Image (spheres, grey):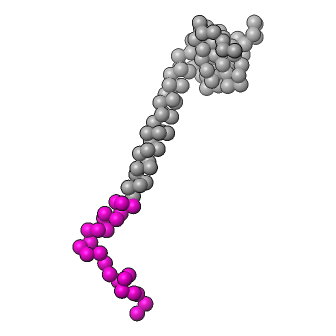
């Protein structure tokens, strides 16, 4: 009485229910795959490249800090800190993660 005939009927054979679930989940899987290849994978590659760049900083390299200060590495204190000369006789300690760019020794400064 309260249930109409359309709701009371089931799919013939019962196999169509599995296909319906697959078709409803498939767009979400496709979106995830596209997001992985367009966003997640390149971001991981950039992070790996940045880690390698920061790990290979040596004395004499010209660096740019996150605040935009350009200086020359005079001493590698430890795995986390560098001593950077920002002016003649003016040395500061900088955390490696605070370095935004490493310039090669012979690279001219862009104006």
Q: Is residue 71 left or right of residue 78?
A: right
The residue at 47%/39% (across/down) is 38
Asked whether 65 or 9 is in front, the reply is 9
Q: Is residue 79 left or right of residue 16?
A: right
Where does the image place residue 79, in percent across and percent down from the top left?
57, 20
Quarter of the image that includes the N terminus: bottom left
The residue at 60%/14% (across/down) is 103
Q: Looking at this rendering, what residue extends furthest in the front direction?
A: 111
Q: Looking at this rendering, what residue extends furthest in the bottom direction?
A: 1
4 in the magenta segment: yes
Q: Quadrant of residue 88?
A: top right
Where is 103 relative to 29, above or below? Answer: above
Range drawn in magenta: 1-24
The residue at 63%/24% (across/down) is 100
Res 84 seen here:
no
The residue at 66%/12% (across/down) is 109
Where is 16 relative to 26, above or below? Answer: below
Q: Is residue 93 left or right of residue 18?
A: right
Quarter of the image that includes the C terminus: top right
Asked whether 103 or 56 is in front, the reply is 103
Where does the image place residue 69, in percent across and percent down from the top left?
71, 19
């Amino acid at each position: 009485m309260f249930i109409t005939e359309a709701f009371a009927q089931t799919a013939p054979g019962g196999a169509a229910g599995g296909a319906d679930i697959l078709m409803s989940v498939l767009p979400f899987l496709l979106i995830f795959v596209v997001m992985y290849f367009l966003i997640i994978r390149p971001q991981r590659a950039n992070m790996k490249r940045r880690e390698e760049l920061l790990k290979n900083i040596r004395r004499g390299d010209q660096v740019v800090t996150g605040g935009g200060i350009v200086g020359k590495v005079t001493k590698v204190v430890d795995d986390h800190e560098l001593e950077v000369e920002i002016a003649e006789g003016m040395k500061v300690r900088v955390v490696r993660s605070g370095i935004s760019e490493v310039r090669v020794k012979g690279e001219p400064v862009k104006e």
